[in-house]
């Protein structure tokens, strides 16, 4: 699928302008797109009222969750190392010489 040269913010701005009452001809002229492109955007994104803001919020939450997973994975590795150290010391003292 071909990627649009327009950002989601630009698409949302064009849709919002038309929604606020700006004539379609002015919106497409200002955006530098065809009417067909605008109608495709409206069909795709018209039902998503806060698409760019929601996406940004989800991306921020995803980054936080990835950070939490990384921290927990690191802590788990540290605990595994401590456990292995304790096991090896225990085996060293309990093995008959």
Image (cartoon, rainbow, N blue to C red):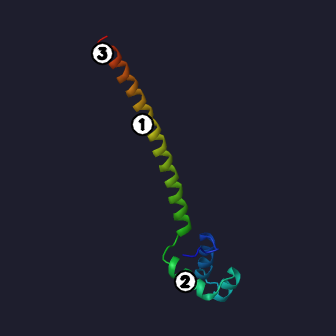
Q: Badge 1 is on which residue?
A: 76
In the image, what residue occupies the spot 33% across and 14% down? 93
- For the residues bearing labels 1 and 2, Cβ distance under 8 angstroms: no
Q: Which secondary structure, mark 3?
A: loop
Quadrant, the N terminus: bottom right
Q: Is residue 75 found left or right of 33 in the rendered image?
A: left
| Local SS, label 2 | helix
Is tag 1's residue or tag 2's residue first in the polypeptide sequence?
2
The residue mark sitting in front, 3 or 2, is 3
Quadrant that contains the C terminus: top left
Q: Residues within 10 Å of mark 2 (few under 14, many from 20)?
A: few
* Residue that numbered label 2 is attached to: 40
Q: Position of residue 11 (x, y in %)?
A: 60, 75
Determine which residue is flagged by label 3. 95
Q: Nearer the viewer, residue 7 or 2?
A: 2
Residues at marks 3 and 1, CA–CA distance in whole angstroms? 28 Å
Q: Quadrant of residue 52?
A: bottom right
- Give x and y (percent) for residue 91: 33, 19
Task: Residue 53 in the image: state x and y as whole percent.
Answer: 55, 64
Name above or below for residue 79 compared with residue 31: above
Q: Residue at x 49, y 73 (%)?
A: 48
Disc on the earlier residue, 3 or 1: 1
Indicate the quadrant where residue 73 lies: top left
Compared with residue 52, is residue 17 higher up or lower down, i.e. above or below? below
- Residue 52 vs residue 5: left or right? left
Query: Marks 3 and 2, how far apart in space?
Result: 75 Å
């Amino acid at each position: 699928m071909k990627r649009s040269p327009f950002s989601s913010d630009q698409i949302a701005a064009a849709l919002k302008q038309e929604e606020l009452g700006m004539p379609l001809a002015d919106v497409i002229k200002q955006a530098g797109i065809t009417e067909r492109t605008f109608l495709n955007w409206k069909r795709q994104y018209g039902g998503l009222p806060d698409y760019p803001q929601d996406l940004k919020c989800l991306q921020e939450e995803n980054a936080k969750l990835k950070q939490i997973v990384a921290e927990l994975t690191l802590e788990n590795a540290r605990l595994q190392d401590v456990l292995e150290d304790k096991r090896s010391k225990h085996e060293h003292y309990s093995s008959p010489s």
